[in-house]
């Protein structure tokens, strides 16, 4: 494992680079993972060790996950002035379809099931993610105090963007907070000042999907952001505005939501009757 002093110095460097707390912790976990793999002191690592690690990741994970680990490792190598050891990320083929997205029926079934199971926190967590398009980590900005205006700001990746919660949902959340005696973070974990654990959200969503009869592949926290984006584009056809809402640096990133699913393509082709 990294030496405590090295941990502290790396954490401070990431902080000076204005990385978010979640990103900093992920970077450190990823470096520990690499250290366990190579079994060497990090000052003794060679380029071949890193290439072997890259091959190991490619054989075990999807390209996006591989790149996530490699980016963390490259960051650390930059911090330690070992730029010559940095490796290229994996090229990801552009997707022609946006698959495994939630349908209207899926969304309705999940909410209805959460109500029946009397899991109000999960019910409102799903509604908040879907109604605002925020990332799960940005739930940290959703507090009881912002419900009066329904507006707050998310900070990350060296920029700040406005988050807007629909007024109708704000009213329901205010009632929920009153019933649960919640102040501060609405979706907190065991400690009132700590955001609910992502692993806990994942487990609860998988359990809910199974109970609701919805495919588990379509039910994960980030897919509610996808669902919001698809609905927004369908209603307003404004990709520039959507890019601002989602916090994308480029409209090109947002264009993924203009793609249809394989099932939608199939239906359109079948409808041609050629």
Image (cartoon, rainbow, N blue to C red):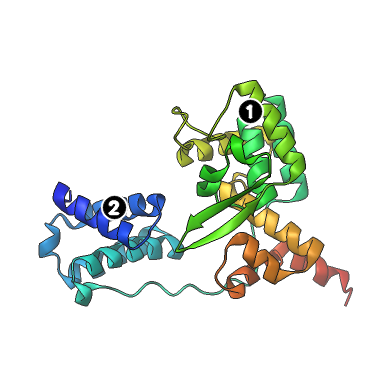
- Between discs 1 and 2, the one toward the N terminus: 2
Q: How far apart are marks 1 and 2 (CA)?
A: 35 Å
- Position of 24 with respect to 229 (left or right) is left
Q: Which of marks 1 and 2 is in front?
A: 1
Numbered circle sitting on residue 177: 1
Horizontal and vertical percent for residue 40? Answer: 12, 57
Query: Would you place residue 52 above or below residue 110 in this image?
Result: below
- Badge 1 marks a residue whose secondary structure is helix
| Residue 174, visible in the rendered structure | yes
- Position of 80 with respect to 208 (left or right) is left
Query: Residue at 89% of width from left, 73% of height from top?
Result: 273
Numbered circle sitting on residue 28: 2
Q: Nearer the viewer, residue 81 or 205?
A: 81
Horizontal and vertical percent for residue 79? Answer: 23, 66
Q: Residues within 10 Å of mark 1 (few under 14, many from 20)?
A: some
- Badge 2 marks a residue whose secondary structure is helix
Q: Which of 100 and 120 is in front in this view?
A: 120
Query: Would you place residue 196 above or below residue 64 in this image?
Result: above
- Position of 138 with respect to 239 (left or right) is left
């Amino acid at each position: 494992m990294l030496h405590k002093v090295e941990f502290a110095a790396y954490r401070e460097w990431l902080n000076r680079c204005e990385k978010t707390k979640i990103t900093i912790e992920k970077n450190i976990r990823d470096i520990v993972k690499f250290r366990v793999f190579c079994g060497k002191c990090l000052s003794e690592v060679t380029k071949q060790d890193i290439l072997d690690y890259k091959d190991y990741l490619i054989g075990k994970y999807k390209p996006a996950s591989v790149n996530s680990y490699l980016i963390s490792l490259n960051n650390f190598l930059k911090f330690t002035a070992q730029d010559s050891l940095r490796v290229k990320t994996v090229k990801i083929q552009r997707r022609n379809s946006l698959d495994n997205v939630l349908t209207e029926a899926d969304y309705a079934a999940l909410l209805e099931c959460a109500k029946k199971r009397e899991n109000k926190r999960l019910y409102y967590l799903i509604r908040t993610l879907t109604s605002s398009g925020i990332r799960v980590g940005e739930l940290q900005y959703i507090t009881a105090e912002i419900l009066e205006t329904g507006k707050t700001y998310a900070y990350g990746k060296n920029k700040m963007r406005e988050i807007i919660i629909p007024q109708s949902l704000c009213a329901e959340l205010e009632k929920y907070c009153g019933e649960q005696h919640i102040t501060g973070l609405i979706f907190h974990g065991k400690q009132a000042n700590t955001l609910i654990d992502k692993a806990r959200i994942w487990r609860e969503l998988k359990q809910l999907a199974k109970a609701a009869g919805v495919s588990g592949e379509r039910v994960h926290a980030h897919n509610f952001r996808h669902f919001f984006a698809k609905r927004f584009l369908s209603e307003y056809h404004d990709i520039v505005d959507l890019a601002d809402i989602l916090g994308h640096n480029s409209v090109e990133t947002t264009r993924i939501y203009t793609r249809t699913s394989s099932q939608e393509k199939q239906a359109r082709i079948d409808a041609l009757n050629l």
